[in-house]
Image: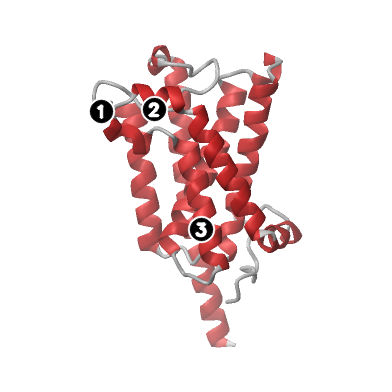
Amino acid sequence: MGPTDTVDSLSAPLAPLPERVETATLRLAWVVVGVNLLGTAFGFWHYRFQLSAAPLAAWPVVPDSPVATLLMAGSVASWKVGRDDDWLHALAFLGSLKYGLWVVYVQLVVNDVLVSGSLYQWFLLWSHLGMGLQALVVYRYATFDPRAVAVAVGWFGFNDVVDYFVPIGGDYYHTHFGPGLAGASSHAGSVHHLAAVGAVGLTALGTYLALAVRVRRLERRQEERRS
């Protein structure tokens, strides 16, 4: 399968972006890499206070969005130079989809961005929406081998555990994001639970989409063998 071939007959829930948008995104691969690297740098700046307050051992699970955009930059660059790093593609897909759409969900459900009047909070919503949507292009070049998907699910599932369910070192490590999730006081009560529902639900959604695309590819190969 060529690098810009689509998987045919995918229903809208599996490939909701128009094909022309997918193709244009892949043609601008190095621009996508650059934008994600800029997003990574901004993200680590955004997390600077939360990182400084966390123990060094917890740093890999604190800056969720910048890690996801860094993985996305690596995935697109890997594909562009002809490498087949499917584990990286699976991590980039699940991470960008999950944390991009999680921020949109939190902004609407927890942070009341529609009535906030904050341009910065609106910027975070729209930039993360783009982050989540770009993940939907990864299926064009990733095979989503079950072992690669398992690596991604294991990592981001572990993030869910330490973010919301089993605090390590006496603290949860979910993002301090916006007025609703601004600090330690948001570790309890309905806000924490709403954030957890969004995170776990998006981990499940990303897992389903990756495996569904994998199944469709296998079905297509069987159809080609019969024809």
Quadrant showing the N terminus? bottom right
CA distance for labels 1 and 2: 15 Å
SS at badge 1: loop
Question: Which label belongs to residue 146?
Answer: none
The quadrant where residue 28 appears? bottom right
Point 50% across, 38% down: residue: 65
Q: Nearer the viewer, mark 3 or mark 1?
A: 3
Q: Nearer the viewer, residue 91 or 198?
A: 91
Which of the marked residues, 1 or 2, is nearer the chain's N terminus?
2
Which of the marked residues, 3 or 2, is nearer the chain's N terminus?
2
Q: Nearer the viewer, residue 199 or 67?
A: 67
CA distance for labels 3 and 1: 30 Å
- Crowd tier of the residue under label 3, counting other residues whose Cα lies within 10 Å: few below 14, some 14–19, many 20 or above: many
SS at badge 2: helix
Asked if the residue under mark 2 is in contact with the one under mark 1, i.e. CB atoms within 8 Å, the reply is no
Q: Could you tell whether 77 is left or right of 121 in the image?
A: left
Point 67% across, 29% down: residue: 123
Q: Could you tell whether 86 is left or right of 171 in the image?
A: right
On screen, 166 above or below 151? Answer: above
Amino acid type at circle 2 is Leu
Amino acid type at circle 3 is Ser
Which of the marked residues, 3 or 1, is nearer the chain's N terminus?
3
On screen, 142 above or below 219? Answer: above
Looking at the picture, how far across and down is residue 168, in whole percent? 25, 28
Question: Which label belongs to residue 168?
Answer: 1
Q: Which residue is mark 2?
A: 51
CA distance for labels 3 and 2: 25 Å
Amino acid type at circle 1 is Ile
Asked if the residue under mark 1 is in contact with the one under mark 3, i.e. CB atoms within 8 Å, the reply is no
Q: Which residue is mark 3?
A: 75
Q: Nearer the viewer, mark 3 or mark 2?
A: 2
Q: Nearer the viewer, mark 1 or mark 2?
A: 2
